[in-house]
Image (spheres, rainbow, N blue to C red):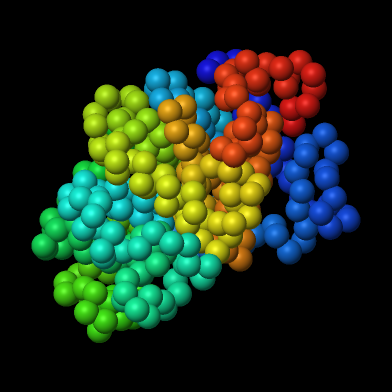
Amino acid sequence: MTSALTTYLDRLSIALSSATAPEVPDAVQPDRGITGDVDTQGDIPDLSFLSGAREDHLAVAICSVDGEITAAGTDHEFPIQSISKAFAYGAAIDLHGMDYVDTVVDEEPSGEEFNALSLDPHTKKPKNPLVNIGAIRTHAMLGTTRQERTQRLRAVLDASAGHALEPHRETWQEELKSADRNLALAYMLRAAGSMTEDATEVVSGYIEGCSVLATVTDLAVMAATLASGGTNPLTGEEVFSRVAARQVLSVMLTCGMYDNAGDWVSDVGLPAKSGVGGGIIAGLPSRFGVASYAPQLDLHGNSVRGTLFFERLSTDFALHMLDGVEPRDLEECAQELMEVGTHP
């Protein structure tokens, strides 16, 4: 992946950076293929400003399963937030086995907001590991002590990125101050008999994992680690078993974009996970991982411009998993788009 794809990503990132609401709602903006309306431009959460988020921040990156990286935009580090949930889930599967994890956390879309106070009324299990209550329960599975859980999650995140990632202490501490809802979820799990670990310690460790900083390139490598069957394409380290990587991608496809998962599958068609820090990762199995960063969020908690990026990328390169189209070489397809002038 070299010149044509780099140019494509550069121009698309410029188009997304200057994207504004068209005069007619849902109108297609000339020469850009970007749609939007005044209700979907997004806002930056106050928490993101603590790690330096700005309105003009935008970055995109692709990492192939062979380790080739193409990126455009800012190299700003930002908290990965809920993206960490996918990697904690994979770690829990490899630690305990799929059969056990499935008895603790389900794998069904919830159709509810990410922080909903919700447990299955019959099984007492969280609906899936990518909503907050499911992620808290999954984090509790990573060890018998807070330190052990934290170390295991950090080790998996570091190995997936190919280098050490550090938490943003200010974000971590600020989230702890306003953790009442997550604590309520943890106590709900305890009250239902679904968790025995100390609620405060589990939530603190879970929030620390969400505060870990990464660049969009780090996230693309992490997504490629999942897409390659669990092996980091840069280091060659086996981070997850193939069973765990496949299961993580499966749940990402159906649950990774919260209560907007249905639209995402229809419009983009890739397993993906978002975070309220503005990041989105997605993976096309056996081919590559993709990541975007733009801090403005929609009402679902997903990056507005990140979603637009993936919609355009999926359309231009026919990436939808259910298209029935033979996968194409990214560089070759980018070259064609540049030559016929359909690029941004």
Name the residue at 24% across, 29% down.
237
Asked if residue 341 is positioned above or below residue 270 in the image, the reply reads above
Q: Residue at position x 29%, y 44% from top?
A: 244
**How many numbered marks does the figure carry?**
0
Q: Determine whether, in the image, residue 57 is placed left or right of residue 308.
A: left
Query: In the picture provided, is 43 more to the left or to the right than 254?
Result: right
Q: Which quadrant does the C terminus fall into?
A: top right
Image point (25%, 38%), residue name: 241
- x%, y% of residue 197? 16, 72
Residue, far bottom? 191
In this rendering, is residue 267 above or below 198? Answer: above
Q: How far from the left and from the top, in percent, is residue 306? A: 59, 46
| Closest to the observer, 119 or 155 | 119
Task: Tell me: residue 286, above or below residue 169.
Answer: above
Q: Quadrant of residue 224?
A: top left
The x, y position of residue 203, in whole percent, is 27, 69
Say which quarter of the image contains residue 141: bottom left
Residue at 28% in and 77% down: 189
In this rendering, does residue 337 appear at all?
yes
**Residue 32: image location, x then y, percent:** 78, 37
Residue 296 seen in render: no
Q: Is residue 292 above or below residue 255?
A: above
Tell which residue pokes out farthest to the right in this image: 24
